[in-house]
Image (cartoon, rainbow, N blue to C red):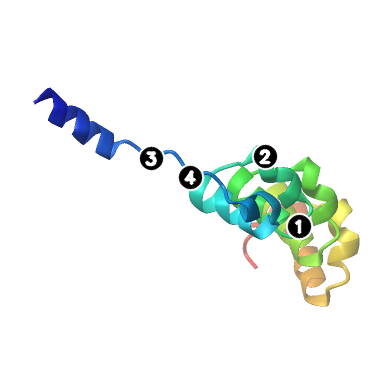
Amino acid sequence: MNFLRRLDEALQAPKPPRLPTQKELTDPGYAYDYAMDVIEGRWPEAEETISKSLLACSYAIYIIKGRWPEAEGTIANDPEAAYFYARDIIEDRWPEGEEAISKNKDLWAKYKRFVKAIENDEDIFGE
């Protein structure tokens, strides 16, 4: 009986994540997917690789769930990433990303409405 109880416990215990493939260690997209789907959390060993890609913003939003200073230089150079990082992570004006955001007319208009809502203490997601 003791054996069956231990077997049942072992079968119900969470399985450790599988080891990453070489591609997951070196490719930002595969690394992001591994962190999101396999580890289901931060993967410090791949963060340098991810931080240099446009996936850095998504990693900050969905995995870190907060600011990621090491990737902000990359994020600030892409209009879409900078807009969503300002809106969803910083939740305030983000001067470092404004030059990139201003290069996309639609995002710039959304960003200005977002900043105005913040300044007027309005619902920031009432786009």
- Tag in front: 4 or 2: 4
**In screen coordinates, is 89 left or right of 39?**
right
**In screen coordinates, is 6 left or right of 70?**
left
Instruction: Work out how far the residue at label 2 is from the one at label 3, CA to CA, in angstroms.
Output: 20 Å
Q: Which residue is mark 2?
A: 45
Residue type at the position of mark 2: Glu
Residue sitting nearer the eye, 4 or 93:
4
Residue 18 numbered tag = 4
Sequence order check, earlier mark of 2 and 3: 3
Q: Residues within 10 Å of mark 3 (few under 14, many from 20)?
A: few
Identified at 69% across, 49% down, the residue is: 89
Instruction: Work out how far the residue at label 3 is from the one at label 1, CA to CA, in angstroms.
Output: 30 Å
**In screen coordinates, is 33 left or right of 76?**
left
Q: Quadrant of residue 69?
A: top right
Q: Which quadrant, please, contains the N terminus?
A: top left
Q: Residue furthest front?
A: 22
Residue 53 numbered tag = 1
Instruction: Work out how far the residue at label 1 is from the one at label 4, CA to CA, in angstroms.
Output: 24 Å
Q: Are marks 2 and 1 in contact (CB under 8 Å)?
A: no
Sequence order check, earlier mark of 3 and 1: 3
Give residue 54's position: percent from left, percent from top.
75, 60
Secondary structure under tag 4 reads: loop
Give residue 37's position: percent from left, percent from top.
50, 53
